């Protein structure tokens, strides 16, 4: 059976996360520069090969010049490490829409096995013939498992929570 490659549609994709800041509010963050590739057997995504590579220096909170933005930059050691990577081990279909995505997530040169929920939003054939696939991936990671231990204390508590909530909205183009 032939292999199909799906390339990330960066203009319509977002790699987002939220972290609790100062034990008071959630600060949204985003990786702005990334690439991803899915290799499937035709249009069947079960056990697809999935690769992701994001640039750490492109992380932003859109709250530049704020304490939250600086804390996020410190948290990911942006001056020491250049990328975050993910390589799927399994992509298991639960039902027509839901999948479990398990793979190796590497942050700051530390690799850990993680499992995320993935929702397949479907395939779309655009009027000019381009076929796209859409996924929403969610999960929670504990940043300390990757030695992301920045905990500068303030009067109100730890500036950034240990848990990072991931909300990843992806579109892929079949080629």
Image (cartoon, rainbow, N blue to C red):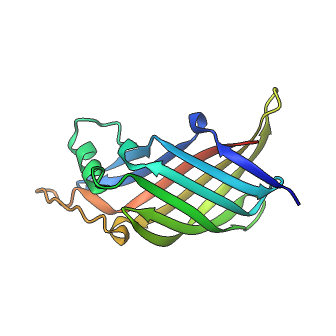
- Furthest residue in direction top, as rendered: 128
Q: 11 above or below 120?
A: above
Choose between 77 and 132: the one closer to the eye.
Answer: 77
- Name the spot of residue 13 as percent of width and height, x first: 57, 41
x 68%, y 61%: residue: 49
Q: 72 above or below 117?
A: above
- Name the spot of residue 75 as percent of width and height, x first: 28, 56
Tell whether 42 sits left or right of 71. Answer: right
- Name the spot of residue 175 as percent of width and height, x first: 76, 42
x 79%, y 51%: residue: 4
Tell whether 72 sits left or right of 8. Answer: left
Which of the 4 quarters of the picture holds residue 106? Answer: bottom left
Q: 99 above or below 170?
A: below
> Can you say which quadrant of the picture contains the N terminus?
bottom right
How many callouts does the rendering have? 0
- Name the spot of residue 169 as percent of width and height, x first: 58, 46
Choose between 81 and 98: the one closer to the eye.
Answer: 81
Choose between 145 and 58: the one closer to the eye.
Answer: 58
x 64%, y 51%: residue: 37
x 79%, y 31%: residue: 126
- Furthest residue in direction right, as rendered: 1
Q: 18 above or below 108?
A: above
Which of the 4 quarters of the picture holds residue 101? Answer: bottom right
């Amino acid at each position: 059976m032939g292999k199909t490659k799906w390339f990330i549609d960066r203009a319509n994709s977002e790699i987002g996360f939220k972290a609790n800041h100062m034990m008071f509010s959630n600060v949204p963050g985003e990786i702005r520069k990334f690439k991803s590739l899915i290799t499937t057997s035709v249009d069947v995504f079960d056990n697809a090969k999935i690769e992701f590579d994001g640039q750490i220096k492109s992380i932003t909170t859109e709250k530049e010049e704020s304490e939250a933005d600086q804390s996020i930059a410190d948290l990911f050691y942006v001056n020491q490490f250049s990328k975050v990577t993910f390589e799927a081990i399994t992509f298991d279909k639960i039902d027509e829409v839901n999948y479990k995505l398990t793979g190796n997530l590497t942050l700051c040169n530390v690799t850990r096995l993680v499992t995320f929920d993935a929702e397949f939003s479907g395939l779309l054939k655009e009027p000019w013939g381009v076929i796209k696939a859409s996924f929403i991936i969610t999960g929670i990671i504990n940043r300390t498992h990757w030695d992301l231990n920045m905990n500068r204390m303030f009067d109100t508590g730890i500036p950034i929570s240990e848990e990072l909530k991931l909300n990843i909205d992806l579109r892929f183009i079949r080629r």
